Amino acid sequence: MGETRPAGASGLAVPCGALGALLGCVEVAVRAEPRLGLSDADLTVWLACAVAMGAAAGAVVGVLARGRPRVAGALLAAGVAALGWRTELALNLPARDPRMLLGMAGTGLAGAVPGALAGPWLRARGPWVRGAFLVAVLGCLITAWLRSHAGGGVVRRTGEPRAPSVLVVTLDTVRRDRIGPYGHDIATPTLDRLAREGVVFDDAVASAPITGPSHLAMFTGRPPVRTGVVANGTPIGPQPLVWEAFRAAGHVTAGFVAGFPVHGRFGWARGMDVYDDDFGDVPGLERLLLPRAWNQLIRRDPARRERAAQAVLARAVPWIRAHRDAPFFVWVHLYDAHGPYHPPDEAELGPPPRRGSPLRLPRAWPAADRGITSPGWLAMAYDGEIRAVDAAIGALLEALGPRRDDVVVAVLSDHGESLGEHDVWFDHGDDLYDPVLRVPWIVRAPGRATPGLRIPCAVGTLDLAPTLLGLAGLPDTVDRDGTDRTAELAGAPCRPEGVHATTVAARDMDAPPLLHALREDGTKTVLGPDGRVSHYDLRADPFERVDLLARPDAAPAVRAHAAAQAERLRGTGAARRPQDAGARSELEALGYVEPPR
């Protein structure tokens, strides 16, 4: 006998909508985890959104099926399976790629068969069906709550802290000479105050001009040539992250990040009680299948790959206030100064000039921005982003409340930005000149660091991890290349050391050629992937305009020194870890990877 169709084309809208709502609950239950740091209110909103979207999608399928339950079941299951495969496993395959088409067809068929077999259940309206549905929904709700609160909450450590609390703020893409403490004519009152109350490293050098590798060097004390992480989108592997030592000492740990290169999917959440890498307006929403598919496949803009400082503060400030009476280690990452530049006070700058020849801006910038012709206007916009970052740091310090003078605060940048030097306009990552390597680094540690002190010698930002452990008085049992700078913070003579920096010489996702530099004794030696060596005298030529090895009259001693430095660089190497292929579109949108041609 054939199926009896309910009256009307939309007869299955209600049962399909109910099934879609159940699938939304299941997805939240699966994706919930305590490190998201969601409150009960956040979790309720997340569930409500998942249920509403699932119900709407299911209802649409029910209408399209025109009263045929087997067709409805097949469509619903096939759609979920195919869309999940596309957004989770084949995100970066072109739409016409045979692998993508075959994968969609295969997963769709795999879902359609059991969906069609279960289709008649959609038409069943008996009490047992409704009861089973309610039990399933209730089970998902309880599971989501339990998974979100696993461990009984974040603050679970008791007793006297073995070390002071620590707040680390990393400023993405902020170069040293664009903030007040380093001489720039800009209103950065919070950074100015920190410089007066703490210690300024006058010549801090990053290990890489790329977000992920540089942050990993800072938080492990190991350079990219040792970690093997030389490009964004690379899983960090079992590296010794400094907050793991603080967690072992009894601290609550949390991270609030603003850019996709340090997303938890790459391993950054390890050792964190809370790791907030959710860039959406509704906490948790971007983890769900439908919003993720919409943003990745339809919108295709960086709106869900980064967030402004105010969005980070909305999550970080309440957490700090709630936990400031417990020993904590908190990392806050601010991404505002990364291009394109659209500061909160952009309206005060007036419209950007567009007459004349456009600047050669990064391909990832929006088309409208790539038509800008004035480097001066963009430099002012960049400064506006830095002012916004300075205000955000002030809000974080205010959140410390009475604990402000008991917390070690470190503010530093992962790398700088080229503002036209060497004909590179408002970009970074492809070279190792000083505009992208010299960064600000300020430490305030009451009772442990001399207020107002400035440390003149060159140090690497990979010294951050051992220095934090030294300030906290915690033993460091990990083999690190970085140096503990607590003695210098207290006024001891500076100990200059060579700084090795690494970057990718091309934005190739799979096997990027590498560029190395060694800065030591006032010189810099650069080794290209083709073996070419450049050598600069930074004291006589701070802007690196003259490659001494390109001059026929270069002294033999200079050539010998450069050759020795280059040989050291050749011996370092860099193991390349497999990169996260599923991250390509996000990295393309942010400009870290060139799209396929």
Image (cartoon, rainbow, N blue to C red):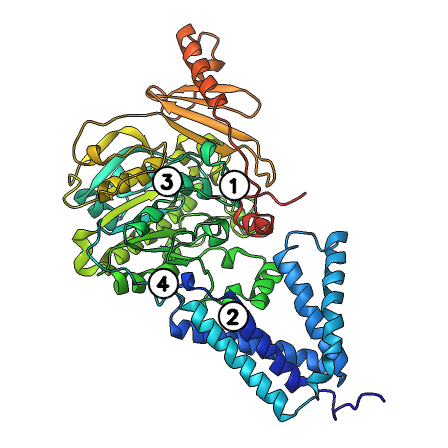
Find the distance from the CA under tag 3 to the CA under tag 2.
Answer: 34 Å
- Which residue: 60% across, 63% down? 293
Q: Nearer the viewer, residue 406 or 517?
A: 406
Residue on which the image places disc 2: 28
Q: Nearer the viewer, residue 453 or 278?
A: 278
Find the distance from the CA under tag 1 to the CA under tag 2.
Answer: 45 Å
Q: Nearer the viewer, residue 49 or 247?
A: 247
Residue 315 marker: 4
Around disc 3, counting alpha carbons within 10 Å, would you say few (fewer than 14), some (14 to 19), or many (20 or more)? many
Residue 260 rendering spot, x and y as whole percentages: 48, 52
What's the amino acid at mark 1? Leu
Residue 407 rendering spot, x and y as whole percentages: 21, 51
Residue 251 rendering spot, x and y as whole percentages: 28, 54
Find the distance from the CA under tag 1 to the CA under tag 4.
Answer: 37 Å
Residue on which the image places disc 3: 218
Task: Classify mark 1: helix, strand or loop.
Answer: loop
Residue on which the image places disc 1: 359
Find the distance from the CA under tag 3 to the CA under tag 1.
Answer: 33 Å
| Relative horizontal placement of residue 172, taking residue 364 as reference (left or right) | left
Task: Classify mark 3: helix, strand or loop.
Answer: helix
- Which residue: 32% across, 49% down? 169
Around disc 4, counting alpha carbons within 10 Å, would you say few (fewer than 14), some (14 to 19), or many (20 or more)? some
Which dot, 3 or 1, sits closer to the camera?
Answer: 3
